[in-house]
Image (cartoon, grey):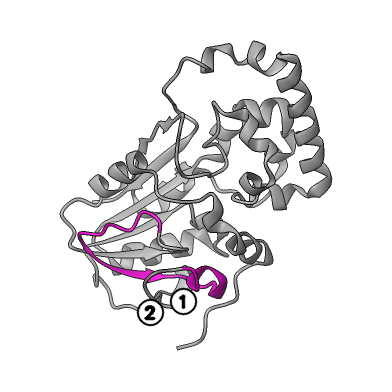
Amino acid sequence: MRPPKPPSADYERLGATYTATRRTDPRVAARIWAALGDARSVLNVGAGTGSYEPADRYVVAVEPSAVMAAQRATPAVRAAAEALPFHDASFGAAMAVLSDHHWRDPIAGLREMARVARRVVVFQWDPEAMADSWLVRDYLPEFRSLGGLLTLAERAAAIGARLEPVAIPWDCADGFFHAFWRRPEAYLQERVRRGSSVWARVGPAVEARVVAELRTDLASGAWRERNAELVALDALDCGYRLLVTG
């Protein structure tokens, strides 16, 4: 078997500090685990450090990054999503959590998941929905011009999956890109920003500008004035979805 192609430099840099802000949120986890159905064996593709792996099922993790794999409590198979080293229908379910946008060919990877498992469950964000968020709308319009981002509809169509919305709780424990939708001050912290690859993709100059503008708006009250309706919400549809087959 050929060794997997090395992950991108952005993915490796993200992995070095990943566990500082990225961890399992129990409410998001409950949705993912419910979608796995009665599968007793689960393949976690792009498994990272092991977040969201169900403790009550047999889990095999696939992770191409040595940096990520070294932070795991359990071993991972070093392989790429696009060439999974397993026979057809080897697992009851295959899952991927906020991972496939890092793959070299997301569609090929999703089809591989569908090949090796009887059910596929993917937790991911939709770039079309993200563009409407306050973070992108008011501070980071460059997000809209990031290339190579497939819509969730395109991903779902490739494997015949249905889409299920997942509202993000205001105090989400997992520090992904839009987890802090009601806690804008968190984006001023570099350790929080290092938990999302978006900042590496837009570059340091854009990142510095966003931080400066957000800091000013928080101090003046402008952010709260523009987003007053969010403050009373316990959860928000930020464009995150489950793709589920079977």
Q: Is residue 66 magenta?
A: yes
In the rendering, at what x and y percent does residue 166 appear?
Answer: 38, 35
Look at the numbered discs 2 and 1 and tell me whether their residues touch, using CB distance below 8 Å: yes
How packed mark 2 is, by other alpha carbons closer than 10 Å (few <14, some 14-19, many 20 or more), is some
Q: Which amino acid does label 1 sit on?
A: Ala
In the rendering, at what x and y percent does residue 126 appear?
Answer: 51, 40
Q: Which quadrant of the structure image shows residue 185?
A: top right
Q: Horizontally, is 218 left or right of 109 in the view?
A: right
User: Given the current orientation, which residue lies at the most extreme left position?
Assistant: 38
Q: Please give the name of the residue rendered at 49% of the width and 68% of the height, measured from the top-left corner.
A: 71
Q: Which of 180 and 59 lies nearest the eye of the viewer?
A: 180
**Figure quadrant of the N terminus:** bottom left
Read off the magenta span.
51-71
Number of residue marks: 2
Residue wearing tag 1: 79
How packed mark 1 is, by other alpha carbons closer than 10 Å (few <14, some 14-19, many 20 or more), is many
Q: Horizontally, is 16 left or right of 222 in the view?
A: left
In the rendering, at what x and y percent does residue 204 appear?
Answer: 80, 49
Q: Please give the name of the residue rendered at 33% of the width and 43% of the height, measured from the top-left corner.
A: 26
Q: Please give the name of the residue rendered at 66% of the width and 63% of the height, measured from the top-left corner.
A: 13
Q: Does the magenta stretch include residue 241?
A: no
